[in-house]
Image: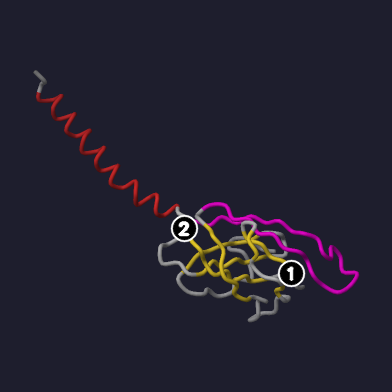
Amino acid sequence: MKSKTEAAVNSMIRRLIVGLLSVLPLTACLERPMNLDVAVYNYWPRAIYDVAVNGQYAGGAFMAYEPGNAGGKIVCCVKVKPGSISIEYSLGGPQGAPRLGERIHATAVLQELPGDSKVLTVHVYPNATAIAEASKEYVDERPEPEGKKQ
């Protein structure tokens, strides 16, 4: 026959297991990929083109940055999930411009993917960095990465 202590511990373990099993499906939903519109904000002082997000086409050309006009537009749709997001694009510019046509590879981290997300906003910076964020609505431009000066 089991002691009262053993019975209490076993009961507590069963409750813990049931509680964990009930939370796991919710966690799995958050990790599921979602199809989102993509808004790309280009902060380079020149155009970029042939943008890809996670290897998926995300737009042909984004004009050079000017305050209040981040050279952005919206493209439908790319599949994303929280975690690392790869962004690739080619540098545009006038004939003879340095690095013209060079393919730039940047990585951003998508911290969260709320269930009501509709837009993936990708901010592309001249120091070959990027920021990605998912939201229900379109976000404002961010000329400087948070905590980083260009």
Q: Is residue 126 left or right of residue 110?
A: right
Q: CA distance from mark 2 to mark 1?
A: 27 Å
Front-most of 54 and 70?
Answer: 54
Q: Tell which residue pokes out farthest to the bottom in this image.
A: 68
Q: Amino acid at mark 1?
A: Ile
**Could you say where residue 109 lies in the image, as x and y percent from the top left?**
56, 55
**126 vs 33: above or below:** below
Helix, strand or loop for disc 1: strand
Label 1, residues with CA under 10 Å away: few <14, some 14-19, many ≥20: many
Q: Amino acid at mark 2?
A: Glu
Magenta stretch containing residue 68, yes or no?
A: no
Label 2, residues with CA under 10 Å away: few <14, some 14-19, many ≥20: some
**Could you say where residue 51 lies in the image, as x and y percent from the top left?**
69, 65
| Residue under the point 66% across and 79% down | 67
Q: Which residues are magenta?
A: 83-111
**24 vs 2: above or below:** below
Quarter of the figure with residue 140: bottom right
Magenta stretch containing residue 94, yes or no?
A: yes
**128 vs 136: above or below:** above
- Residue named by callout 1: 48
Q: Is residue 50 left or right of residue 77?
A: right
Q: Is residue 83 left or right of residue 17?
A: right
Q: Earlier in the sequence, mark 2 or mark 1?
A: 1
Front-most of 56 and 128?
Answer: 56
- Residue 112 numbered mark, or none: 2
Quarter of the figure with residue 79: bottom right
The C terminus is located in which quarter?
bottom right
